[in-house]
């Protein structure tokens, strides 16, 4: 079964460039949801992007232009729908402040 989601391209262009699994540059970012040395969660017009790795460090952040650059060992990239941030247990943001 094919997944034919209609991803809106009305927002900022969204691109990802990874250099040797040590640096990732992302455009089309609308918000930084959370970050630490092992996980960076970014909101884009096309969904929530979770980046997992080790020693992650946000090197460049410009939300006006939608640009984020991260250094560190990149292990995994995962997209989820924006609705994935808000669950039945009160939502991701409310769990952060518990």
Image: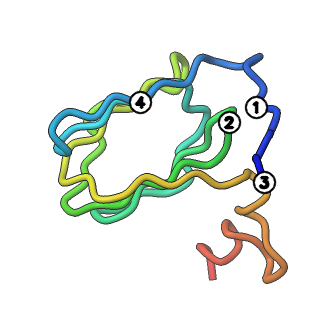
Q: Earlier in the sequence, mark 2 or mark 1?
A: 1
Res 7 label: 1
Spatial distance from mark 4 to mark 1, Cα to Cα? 16 Å
Q: Give the mark, 4 or 1, whose residue is nearer the N terminus.
A: 1
SS of the residue under disc 3: loop
Q: Say which residue label 2 marks.
A: 46
| Mark 2 residue element | loop
How packed is label 4: few (under 14 Cα within 10 Å), some, or many (20 or more)?
Answer: few
Image marks 2 and 4: residues in contact by CB distance under 8 Å: no
Which residue is rendered at x = 71% and y = 72% of the image?
94
Q: Quadrant of the C terminus?
A: bottom right
Q: Tag 4, which secondary structure? A: strand
Crowding at label 1, few (<14), some or many (≥20) Cα neighbours within 10 Å? few
Position in image of residue 7 (x %, y %):
76, 31
Which residue is identified by label 3? 1
- Measure the C-alpha gap from mark 2 to mark 4: 12 Å
């Amino acid at each position: 079964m094919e997944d034919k989601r209609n991803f809106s391209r009305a927002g900022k262009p969204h691109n990802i460039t990874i250099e040797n699994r040590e640096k990732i540059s992302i455009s089309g970012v609308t918000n930084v949801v959370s970050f630490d040395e092992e996980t960076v969660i970014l909101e884009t017009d096309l969904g929530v992007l979770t980046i997992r790795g080790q020693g992650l460090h946000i090197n460049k952040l410009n939300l006006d232009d939608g640009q984020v650059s991260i250094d560190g060992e990149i292990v995994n990239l995962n997209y989820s729908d924006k609705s994935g941030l808000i669950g039945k247990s009160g939502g991701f943001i409310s769990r952060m402040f518990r």
